[in-house]
Image: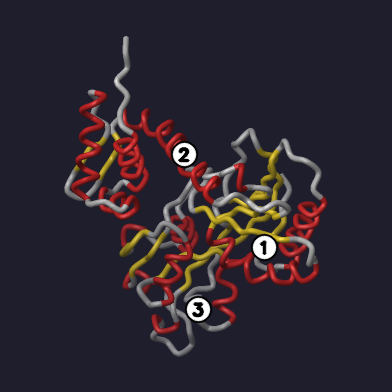
Amino acid sequence: MTTHMPTLVSLRAFEAVARHKSFRKAADEICVTHAAVSHQVKALETSIGVKLLERTSRSVELTPAGEQYYPPVREHIQGIIKATRRIQTPEEPDVLLVQSYASFNTMWLQPRLADFLQDNPDTRVRIVSTFEDGDYDMHRFDVGVFNAPPFDKRFDYSPLFETDIYPVCAPEALNAPSGGMPLEELGNYLLLSVPSTWNEPDDWDCWLDAAGLDRETMKFGSVFDNYPLVREAVLNNHGISVARAPFCARDLERGRLVRPFDISVPEPGRWYLATQKERAPNPKLDTFIDWLFEQIEADPTMRLFRA
C-alpha cells in the first residue's frame, strides 16, 4: 500500500496550531494569515483522511487521532527547525552552552554570570533559553537547569534545588499603607498564571489551599506562556501572580514588586541539573557546575536537596 505523504507546509501548520492550541498564534509564528493556516490544516486532514482538530469558537483541541499524530510530527518539525538554525549559525568551539527556561536565565542566572566570567576570563558562555519542559536540543546543550522530573535517557540528572512560591503584585495594587492585604480581599483582583507542567499541581491551587481560600471565589485573568511575560503584566499592575522566590527577589528588594501576604508554600516541582551522558571531559564545564552549586547554596531563597 502506498502512503500519500502530506506536504511539509501543512504539517508545519498543524504542529504550530496543536502546540499553541490557537490558529491565530500559529499564524503569527509562521508569518501567514489565519485563513492560510486553517486551509493548510484542512488540506492535511483531507490528505490523510483523518480529523485531527476539534474547532470551536473559543478553543482548538486535538482529537484522539490528533493526540496520536502530534508528538512525532512535533519531534520531526522541531528537529528540522533546529537543524536549520545550526547550519545557518554554527556553534563556536570552546563555548559552554547553558540551557534553561527564560525565567531562570533572565531572572536569576544572568545577573550573576558577570562575576563568573570575570573570575574565569578564558571561559565563554552562551545562554540558550527554552520555554517548555523537554524542549532539549542536545546540540545546543552542555549543561541544563530544568524544573522537570528526570525523563530523558540521553542525560544524567543531578538534584539541584527547591524553593518556595507566593503571590506578588505591584505596589500600586495595595490600598493599605502598611503594604499588606487582608486575605478576603484577594477575590477582588485578577489572578494571573502560567500553565503547570508535568502534571504538577497548579501554583495558585497550591497557594490557595495553604491560605484556606476557595478557588471558586477567585477571579482568574490571563494565562501566560512563561514567567518573564507574567512578571511584566504584574509590574504594569494588571493583576497578581504567584512567583518563585529566586526569580522575584531583586524586584522585591528594589520595591518594584511587593508581597501582599506572608504565606508561602513549597514549589510543586524541583529543579535538576542535566548533562549529556556521552560527553568528553571538560574542565571548564566542571568549573561552571561547581560555581552554579556555590551560587545556589549562597542564595537564601533556594534549598539544595538530595534525591
Looking at this view, name the residue that lies furthest to the top. Answer: 1
Residue 73 in view in this figure? yes
Whole-angstrom CA distance, mark 3 to mark 1, is: 19 Å
Residue at horizontal 65 percent and vertical 54 percent from the top: 98
Position of 77 with respect to 90 (left or right) is left
Dot 3 surroundings within 10 Å: few (below 14), some, or many (20 or more)? many
Task: Tell me which numbered mark, 3 or 1, is placed earlier along the sequence.
Answer: 3
Looking at this view, name the residue that lies furthest to the bottom. Answer: 177
Write down the residue under mark 1: 302
Whole-angstrom CA distance, mark 2 to mark 3, is: 44 Å
Q: Secondary structure at mark 3?
A: loop
Tell me which amino acid carries mark 3. Answer: Val
Task: Tell me which numbered mark, 2 or 3, is placed earlier along the sequence.
Answer: 2
Dot 2 surroundings within 10 Å: few (below 14), some, or many (20 or more)? few
Q: How many marks on residues?
A: 3
Residue at horizontal 57 percent and vertical 46 percent from the top: 148
Task: Tell me which numbered mark, 2 or 1, is placed earlier along the sequence.
Answer: 2
Tell me which amino acid carries mark 2. Answer: Ile
Residue at horizontal 37 percent and vertical 28 percent from the top: 68
Residue 271 in view in this figure? no
Label at residue 80: 2
Position of 250 with respect to 115 (left or right) is left
Residue at horizontal 64 percent and vertical 64 percent from the top: 109
Whole-angstrom CA distance, mark 2 to mark 1, is: 37 Å
Tell me which amino acid carries mark 1. Answer: Met
Picture quadrant of residue 225? bottom left
Picture quadrant of residue 236? bottom left
